[in-house]
Image: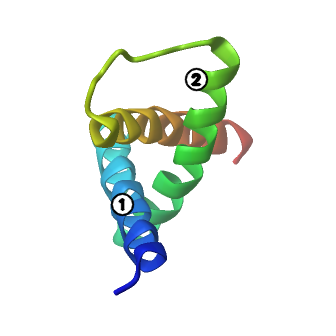
Amino acid sequence: MDRRTQQLLIFLLIGILAGWLASIVVGGGGLIRYLVTGVIGAFVGGYLFDALGIRLGIRSALLSQIITATVGAIVVVLLARLIA
């Protein structure tokens, strides 16, 4: 398995985990929904944290990415509920 494939798999696993964690906070379910909200949430969380100048101060890059993606996924789910 090459490096790009590993990175993609890690990104998808972070997305699934973040979507699952977001579903615990705001409700929802299903593996595909976890993946979609987590992956979109990773982009949204990264953008929001960067735009607002938020730095988590966590030494573990993986944990920081999971938290950022989870926060983004929560925002995505809440915005989707407002729209629908």
Where residue 7 appears, as percent x and y from the top left, is: 42, 66
Q: Amino acid at mark 2?
A: Phe
For numbered disc 1, what is the local secondary structure? helix
Q: Nearer the viewer, residue 32 or 26?
A: 32
Q: CA distance from mark 1 to mark 2?
A: 20 Å
Q: As drawn, is 12 to the left or to the right of 21?
A: right
Where residue 36 appears, as percent x and y from the top left, is: 52, 62
Q: Amino acid at mark 1?
A: Ile
Q: As drawn, is 53 to the left or to the right of 65?
A: right
Mark 2 neighbour density, 10 Å: few (under 14) some (14–19) many (20 or more): some
Q: As drawn, is 8 to the left or to the right of 47?
A: left
For numbered disc 2, what is the local secondary structure? helix
Numbered badge on residue 49: 2
Mark 1 neighbour density, 10 Å: few (under 14) some (14–19) many (20 or more): many
Seen in the picture, residue 10 relative to 38 is either above or below; the reply is below
Seen in the picture, residue 55 relative to 46 is either above or below; the reply is above
For marks 1 and 2 on the same chain, the one whose residue lies earlier in the sequence: 1
